Amino acid sequence: MSKSRDLLREEQSGPLMADVAKLAGVAISTVSRALANPDRVNEKTRAKIDAAAKQLGYTPNAMARGLRVGKSNVVMIVLPGSLYYGASQIVPQVLQAINNRLLENGYTLMIANLARDEASERHILNLAFGGTVRGAIILASKLPELEGRSLGNSGLPLISMLMDMSGAGVPSVVTNDRGAVREATSSLIGLGHRRFLYLAGPEGNYHDVERFGGMLEALQQAGLPETAVVRSGGKLDYQEGFKIGLQAADHFAALTDKPTAVVATSDDMAISFMSKMREMAVAIPGDLSIVSFDGSPVCEFCAPPLSSIMQPAEEMGIAAVDMLLEAIENPGLSSAARKVIPSQLIVRETISVPRSHA
Amino acid sequence: MSKSRDLLREEQSGPLMADVAKLAGVAISTVSRALANPDRVNEKTRAKIDAAAKQLGYTPNAMARGLRVGKSNVVMIVLPGSLYYGASQIVPQVLQAINNRLLENGYTLMIANLARDEASERHILNLAFGGTVRGAIILASKLPELEGRSLGNSGLPLISMLMDMSGAGVPSVVTNDRGAVREATSSLIGLGHRRFLYLAGPEGNYHDVERFGGMLEALQQAGLPETAVVRSGGKLDYQEGFKIGLQAADHFAALTDKPTAVVATSDDMAISFMSKMREMAVAIPGDLSIVSFDGSPVCEFCAPPLSSIMQPAEEMGIAAVDMLLEAIENPGLSSAARKVIPSQLIVRETISVPRSHA
DNA sequence: CGATTTTTGGCAAACGTTTGCTATGAATCG
DNA sequence: CGATTCATAGCAAACGTTTGCCAAAAATCG
């Protein structure tokens, strides 16, 4: 018996709580209490236990603990299928902010990609229903659902980030896509621009609806017709931003009544569009003003430096974690709240008065 | 009893294996076998069990399973302190590739940041020693170590990625930093360049040592003195790439005997450097050729399109996972192997014959 | 100094699986 | 048709913790 035990020890796990107890000369339960609830145990005893634990290099087994208490300290982040964006650092920024915030609170981050295949969906559901995770932050645009199980009714605390799902009962932290684009457009109108090109994300996508909505609101406020804006793109996903920008450039070239300003809904679109404009000898901002969305760090070094609406990735990440932990700790009140963190337009050198006004 | 049981049910967990067994009219152990080892159970019985499981929406509890079998299906990736890079998509690319590959093999990815503080270090060690993770892929440049516990002797299968630690007994998958820079430099020499500016990462950093080493090797091969290259930077970390590029531009401006080619060791450095050159009216590649490192997607749309050595992030991620799974499944042979996946120089429009030769 | 309260320690059950062993029933063979 | 083998099901122990409950010891009070 002790032979096989020792063999197992060789192969695998380290010291057990029982070992610590024996070394310290106390019962297992005392060790457990000393580690979790230090004030419920005599200081001297606690000191002995701490010393023994350190001496043995003892680390409590997380799965045993999790099984017993029926909870884990793992939070899952559900990312959209492809993380691959051209210039944006939003995903790493969000990941980092969330991870740090979780760490401060004793949680660990697990990542899951939600692609279009059943496998990824099933995987996420298993994580949720199998008790592996304690809560989830969703960056994807839909909730996984398969064979009767759905993340939505897993009983798991959920927070949607980037996308407003508070209407569907999922507390959300978002940025004001609509308002930010409206204001940016308004300021272009204020400079004298009257004809716009809008580089769209995928038709029907939440962000595209919001951003284009903001554009239309700005036109309406200024008494301009909807025809003042030409919509380009709409077929490809945001991860194809460079391609969208390239196609939009062709689109632009083919227009007879040229717009004087473009609103791109991602930096990638703007960057590839600008590179094409350079080839076509369209002066920016002389001939054409540009403002885009995301606020990628690289915008500062574009030619010319690109004005962009910066998404507050870190603040959003922190807010999402705080809301999630709140929901985890108070399972009672499900507020389905919505927290809006404003984006900020960073004005650089791609915006000016239109030539016709100069 | 059944009251409190039902209450618990309300609050928390879903159906148990016992429920499935009852519904299917078999014993718990039969259910377990049917789910894990389908051929060890009568087909008819299995069908009943599967139906019952689906009907109840049963998901096995991962922690109970993990505790029993003494293993988890979680792999940890240890990322360096800051994920924040200006334009590079290496981190998301690696994450995605690793995550997908793990998913295919039934594993889950947990992420951990290794910062300079004890907290992050302790956290990682707890994950490793607490049985939470089954193996780890290291992107950070050191192994966490604290109070006698070290990732190195946790008994956990480890793979180092990006950085060669095979000498220290950790199997590694790396790219040939040295060779890639050597060849890029050689081809610049072939074009006639004789004076170089090298934009360095942090002094002593593995990558910087390798890349600068490659540079020197190329000079030596061509019979050029080491003084043919001016080293700029060395103080800041790669995550400060933009700043490094800016400072290098000032450095360049101050040089009397101007180099005709620059080798930047990250795209960020090259991008901000080029933006400064534009201001200073230094023509690229006319006055100055540039080649950089990373192969960020955005390089294609720089002004002018930037030549860069592309790191094979996805292949490396896949290779790292494969090596790790190999090590997990065959705990016997620890080969401490090293797998080198070559980088590839993408030539764009920042390289030409030096003016003096034109 | 005895009685009462407070503190602290120990026993054992429980968390939800997996799995070795045994028992049962079916099937095959002589 | 009985005996032997094989397939399949069931029992119960184990994984490493936490925690309710009780006992013992210490401290306080009258």
Image (cartoon, coloured by chain):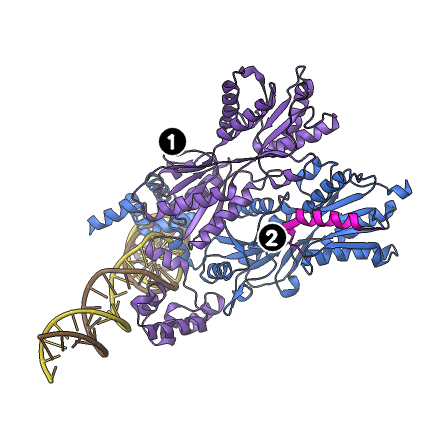
Chain colours: A blue, B purple, C brown, D yellow
One can see residue A257 in this view: yes
Q: Quadrant of the C terminus of chain B?
A: top right
* Drawn side of residue A270 relative to residue B51, left or right: right
Residue at mark 2: A320
Q: Is residue A269 above or below residue A154?
A: above
Residue at mark 1: B167
Q: Is residue B206 above or below residue A261?
A: above
Q: Quadrant of the N terminus of chain B?
A: bottom left
One can see residue A264 in this view: no
Q: Chain of mark 1?
A: B
Q: Residue furthest right?
A: A357
Which residue is pictured at 88% across the width and 46% down the height?
A192
Instruction: Between residue B126 and residue D25, name the one nearer to us.
Output: B126
Tell me the crowding category of disc 2: few under 14, some 14 to 19, or many 20 or more residues within 10 angstroms, Cα based: many
Whole-Å distance between the Cαs marked 1 and 2? 42 Å
Residue A252 part of the magenta-drawn span: yes
> Judging from the image, what secondary structure is the residue with disc 1 in?
helix
Q: Residue furthest front?
A: B358
- Magenta-tinted stretch: A235-256
Dot 2 amino acid type: Ala
Q: How many marks?
A: 2
> Judging from the image, what secondary structure is the residue with disc 2 in?
helix
Q: Position of residue B141 (x, y in %)?
A: 47, 34
